[in-house]
Amino acid sequence: MKISLACYPTACAERAERQPSSWAYEVRARLETAVRDGLAEFARLKLNPVDRMIACWGRAPRVYSQHWPVRDGDELVPPTRAMREAARVVAEEEVSRLSGGLVTVEDLDAESRLAVIALGINGLGDFAFDDALQMSRSLNFHLQQRNGNYRVSDALVAYASASDSERAAPLAIRGNRLRLLKPEERARVRLDNPQTLWDRLCGLILLYRDGGIVAARNYLSAHGQLDNPALRGLLKVWANECGDETLQREARLIDYEL
């Protein structure tokens, strides 16, 4: 599905003769409403989750063009800003739905955000790279292959080659299929020096296996996460969505003992 950022010529010509719309007081709220309404509508229709996100994200250019030109104070608001706002709303709704409101989109960096949404859609199964690419667009970040360790960026989600022996990334690719890696499949150096909340979740699970709840608590304390409700929420999402009974029991036991 391709989304055009160009406004409709007739609509733009008509709007050019009128006063600019206010981003802060008019357009942003209408855009958010349009995206949230779309998510609810397409959920009732049982639309494929990836298609639902893309379709709702695609409502942004329609709202933008209907109110063009759009200003925020003295600045003209570009269509890319409308798309970023739509991406924020889509991510917010998906993360809230999957976590039952325990985790917000503001709690998560880009990699953790995609990991949560991919887990909710596919569990630990593989999925088409094209689906991930479409999700990345509707969530406003880039996908890029990074083997070995790397510095995380909030505009980037990395995936590793399936043959890479040190997979720091949360995803791995084989052919044209991606899958979310289990904690034990990721590079230990990344989990010992976590950069994202998803890293910390994986590290917590591995340390619990190594040394029980004491080791798990020490790990969380060392990384300032002992009392982080977002991490506990992420643990619940993992337990609910991973689709493996053994991993589910383990996650629920960790949550209980914490």
Image (tube, helix red, strand yellow):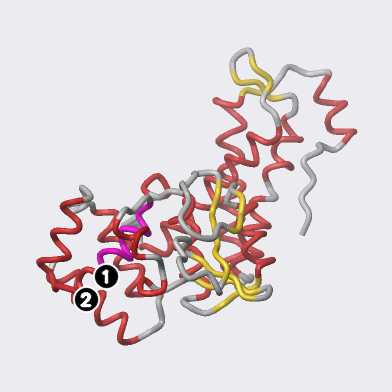
Where is residue 107? Give x, y as percent: 36, 48
Which image quadrant is residue 61 in? top right
Where is residue 145? Give x, y as percent: 60, 58
Q: Pointer 2: what residue?
A: 209
Which image quadrant is residue 162 in? bottom right
Q: For the N terminus, give its image quadrant.
A: bottom right
Identified at 53% across, 73% down, the residue is 179
Q: Pointer 1: what residue?
A: 205
Residue type at mark 1 is Ile
Pick whichever, 30 or 140, lies toward us: 140
Crowdedness of circle 2 by 10 Å Cα count: few (<14), some, many (20+)?
some
Q: For the C terminus, give its image quadrant.
A: bottom left
Where is residue 247? Give x, y as percent: 31, 81
Q: Is residue 197 above or below residue 246?
A: above
Identified at 55% across, 36% down, the residue is 29
Label 2 SS: helix
Pick whichever, 119 or 39, lies toward us: 119
| Rendered image: mark on residue 71 | none
Q: Residue furthest bottom?
A: 245
Identified at 25% across, 65% down, the residue is 204
Pick whichever, 98 or 214, lies toward us: 214
Spatial CA span between label 2 and label 1: 6 Å
Side of 37 where 248 appears, left or right:
left
Pick whichever, 191 or 250, lies toward us: 191
Residue type at mark 2 is Arg
Magenta region includes residue 202: yes
Magenta region includes residue 240: no
Q: Is residue 115 above or below residue 240?
A: above
Side of 174 where 120 appears, left or right:
left
Label 1 SS: helix
**Pointers 2 and 1 in contact (C-beta within 8 Å):** yes
Residue segment shown in magenta: 196-204
